[in-house]
Amino acid sequence: MRNSQKPIILVFNKIDLYPEKTCQEIYQNLLSLSVENNNLSTLLTETDIVLIAAAPTPEQVRVEQATGEVSYIWESPPPQIEDLQDKILTLLNREGRSLLALNALTQTRALEFSRRDAIFTARNLEADTLIWQYARTKAIAIGFNPFWLIDWLGGTLCDLAMIRSLSRLYGQPMTSYQAGKLLKTIVLSSGGLVASELFGGIVLGFGKALEPPGLAAFGGVGLVQGVAAGYGAYRVGLAAIAYLEQGCTWGEQGASTVIRQILSQVDHATVLHRLRQELQTP
């Protein structure tokens, strides 16, 4: 609350249950409390701690009638809250307008954050759909194609087209040259996680080219290569999103750290299973 510039009043209630000396001891102990390694006296002044009795304990009262008859009843003393009332009124008179303005700004900021989160959620869903479309297209194209060189060129063009589509979605349109630089950064900074899939796809392309055409089309090698290509495109897309969400920057951690963190969080088994299911569906 102090970090948010909110005024603080610490209320010590039920003082009617303690002797005056004990109340003063508790009052001094409150000042010496620690909050997040700070002494409470650095957050509050002595005038910010108010002692009250909001609902004092009922007291037994002797009642004597005019007839001389005596009885005893329990009576609740009036609340001892004058000091708190004075403190609140003084605070409102001194800072009331500033507090109203601060509350309005706080509510506006909360609405902005809520709106931003809703936009991010909708955009991320659209981005995920876009990535899957490119991953599936790349997987099918490479799985069917028998020529490894066309595989490599087509796969690269597909990744570049995906990055440019994502950049437009996030309001950061890129040229082909900029998309190429980003793809190069993702591949080189992935610690071999993406590069190994690209080179593995080329090796598989050699093997597929040696098979008879009928066996290659979504046969053993074709299916494996297509799934690997789609998986690589999916991971490139996630890394590109991390870059675009931060305004075309990798932040203080740098490209290598951010990319490896993103790629390490990918559910390997689920993504591969989904790609296999889509590729094997007629």
Image (cartoon, rainbow, N blue to C red):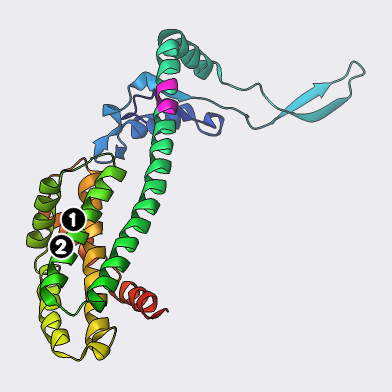
Q: What's the magenta region?
A: 104-108
Q: Amino acid at mark 2?
A: Thr
Location of residue 228 (image quadrant)? bottom left
210 or 243, nearer to the observer:
210
Give the residue number, with chain letter if any, for mark 1.
160
Q: Position of residue 252 (x, y in %)?
A: 12, 45
Q: Position of residue 218 (x, y in %)?
A: 29, 83
In the image, residue 98 sits, relative to residue 148, either above or below, namely above
Q: In the shown orientation, is residue 75 left or right of residue 189? A: right
Q: Amino acid at mark 1?
A: Leu
In the picture, which quadrant includes the N terminus?
Answer: top left
Q: Position of residue 102 (x, y in %)?
A: 40, 20
Q: Residue at x 35, y 77 (%)?
A: 279
276 or 4, nearer to the observer:
276
Going by the picture, which residue comes out furthest to the right?
Answer: 67
Number of residues whose C-alpha sits closer than 10 Å to that of mark 1, classed few (under 14), some (14–19) or many (20 or more): many
In the image, residue 143 sits, relative to residue 35, either above or below, namely below
The Cα atoms of the two marked residues, 1 and 2, are separated by 6 Å
Q: Position of residue 108 (x, y in %)?
A: 42, 26
For the residues labelled 1 and 2, say whether their Cβ atoms are less than 8 Å apart. Answer: yes
